[in-house]
Image (cartoon, rainbow, N blue to C red):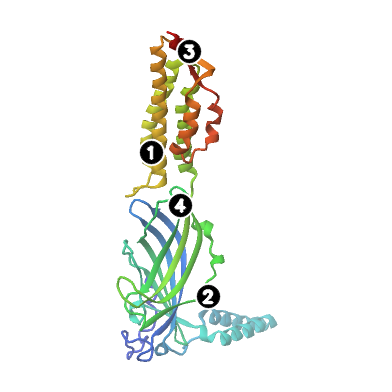
Amino acid sequence: LDWWQNEDTDYPPEDYEIFKRPAKPGYPVNVWTYIRLDHLYEISEDDSTIHFHLTCRLKWNDTRLRFTPSHPNPGCSLVSSRNHHQHHQSRSRVAMLHIFLCLLFFVVNADATYRIVKPSSIWHPSLRVLKDTAHNEPLETVRIKSSGEVVYTAHYDSKVWAEIDFRHYPFDSHKFVVDISSYRYSADRVILNMTNFDPNRVNLEALSGPMWRVVGFNQKSVPNKRTVYLDNDSVVEMELFVKRRITNPLVVMILPMALLSILATSPLFISIEKFSDRAAIGATGCFTIVMFFFVVNEYFPKMGYLTWLHYYTIFTNMYIFGAFFATMALQVIHRKNGGETELGMDTIPFTPNLIQTVSPLFTPPLPCSCLSIFTRPCKVNLTQSRTM
């Protein structure tokens, strides 16, 4: 919809130069900037991008665009003529009061009359979102007041590349910084100044999603910053603080590892007469952990380095396989003694000291108290085999 098609054809003036800045030579143009984050669509971990929609509003003065309102405000004009007609019909005092209030409103707000023009017809510091991979054209509007104040509004649908650090995954939180600058001018020609921004007025809960929770949003102006385009670029930094919702990773990754560690340890403390059951439980734990790898792989983000969760998985598996081999060793001892080995309180200590010594090394996040229920004296009586 060409909402500017009804504007006067003689505006802007014919002598208006589009490529000339509205400032004295050698002085930058002060542009007041306001940025509103409307929606956070996605934080993609596969390609490390942030997809969002934001609104940028710029304001500056251009004395070359001043004009005198040639007609009153259309709303007031309509009300005035209607009430004037009612006054002649009924000569009501209420109609006279309406006329007086309408004229008073017009006098007070006469300077607020504005014109809407095409963005390409006047000078404006076009903005760009740095590191934008979407390259979508913004939706721009320009409103000019009779005093020469220009209000430029642009809506951006951007997908910005951002570095995501997974060292604390899945309990990670991130700070994303999005730079917005003028792609036509450097800081010595255009300075982007921030308006009064109140972070408490931002609805963070509305920006949050099912996987991420927005915990903070801020913006500030940096007058001279080195970017990929300029050494002295005037930018507005939009800071976004997010935290991962850890419900699914906690239940699917960490807790099953701890339960499988207990499952693999339990065969060492079952009755000596049921070594076959011990072997079966240990084998079940080993096969379960192999299948569990396929599930964990679906939840792990694609990263090129190891995190604490990788080490946790490796050490837990080493512990599970070690417990399985210990069970098999007891089975071999049981068979060599003709199946006559049995538990006793006055015999050789075997598993409790081993478990208490090794468990802190192989299961760092798994408390030793989880294994305390199994650390009763478990000893193998080889007295009968010695006498033989």
- Which element is circle 4 on? loop
Question: Residue at label 1?
Answer: 314
Q: Amino acid at mark 2?
A: Asn
| Placement of the N terminus among the 4 image quadrants | bottom left
Q: Quadrant of the C terminus?
A: top left
Q: Residue at x 43, y 22 (%)?
A: 281
Residue nearest the observer in this picture, 203 or 145: 203
Q: CA distance from mark 2 to mark 1?
A: 51 Å
Residue 288 visible somewhere in the drawing: no
* Residue, disc 4: 172
Task: First in sequence, mark 4 or 1: give its number.
Answer: 4
Q: Nearer the viewer, mark 1 or mark 3?
A: 3
Relative to 350, is 48 on the left or the right?
Answer: left
Answer above or below: position of 332 versus 82. Answer: above
Which residue in the protein does label 2 denote? 196
- Mark 4 or 2: in front is 4
What is the three-letter code of the residue carrying label 1?
Ile
